[in-house]
Image (cartoon, rainbow, N blue to C red):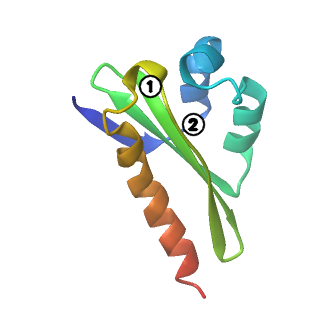
Amino acid sequence: MEIQINNMNLNDLESICSNLEKDFDDFWNYNILKNELQNPNSIYFVAKDKNNNILGFAGILKILDEADITNIVVKKDYRNKGIGTMLLKPVSYTHLRAHETR
């Protein structure tokens, strides 16, 4: 399966908003995720297949020289296929870069 990891934006959120709670997890709703994407201290990544379908997303919150992983979410039908691990790589890199300033 060919997966691309990119920065997530509001257009990505709009493309999954009607199925966000059903296809991903019910603790994430549109407004919460929109606020996260608009937060200048948050960085989100999105996993897309070759047809540009969103299969998962992950976020990190940077505060000063710390970074906390806020979530890693994969579409229910695509779990256990390594997509979460793929999303963890850019999140981990961002997390490590935040700690380099210490």
Looking at marks 1 and 2 on the same chain, the residue that comes earlier in the sequence is marked by 2
Residue in view at x 58 percent, y 85 percent: 101
User: Are dots 1 and 2 in contact, CB under 8 Å?
Assistant: no
Residue 51 screen position, x and y as percent: 31, 19
Q: Is residue 75 left or right of residue 16?
A: left
Q: Is residue 14 left or right of residue 64?
A: left
89 is higher (above) or lower (below) than 18:
below
Quickly name the residue at label 1: 54
From the viewer's perspective, is the residue at label 1 or at label 2 nearer?
1
Residue 55 screen position, x and y as percent: 42, 27
Residue furthest out toward the front: 80
For the residue pair 73 and 44, the one nearer the viewer reads as: 73
Three-letter code, disc 2:
Asn
Residue in view at x 57 percent, y 73 percent: 98
Name the quarter where the N terminus is drawn. Answer: top left
Three-letter code, disc 1:
Ile
For the residue pair 39 and 58, the one nearer the viewer reads as: 58
Residue in view at x 38 percent, y 24 percent: 78
Residue in view at x 68 percent, y 23 percent: 26
For the residue pair 64 and 27, the one nearer the viewer reads as: 27
Tell me the SS state at disc 2: loop
Residue furthest out toward the top: 18
Name the quarter where the C terminus is drawn. Answer: bottom right
94 is higher (above) or lower (below) than 49:
below
Q: Is residue 29 left or right of residue 58?
A: right
Quickly name the residue at label 2: 9
Residue 87 screen position, x and y as percent: 42, 46
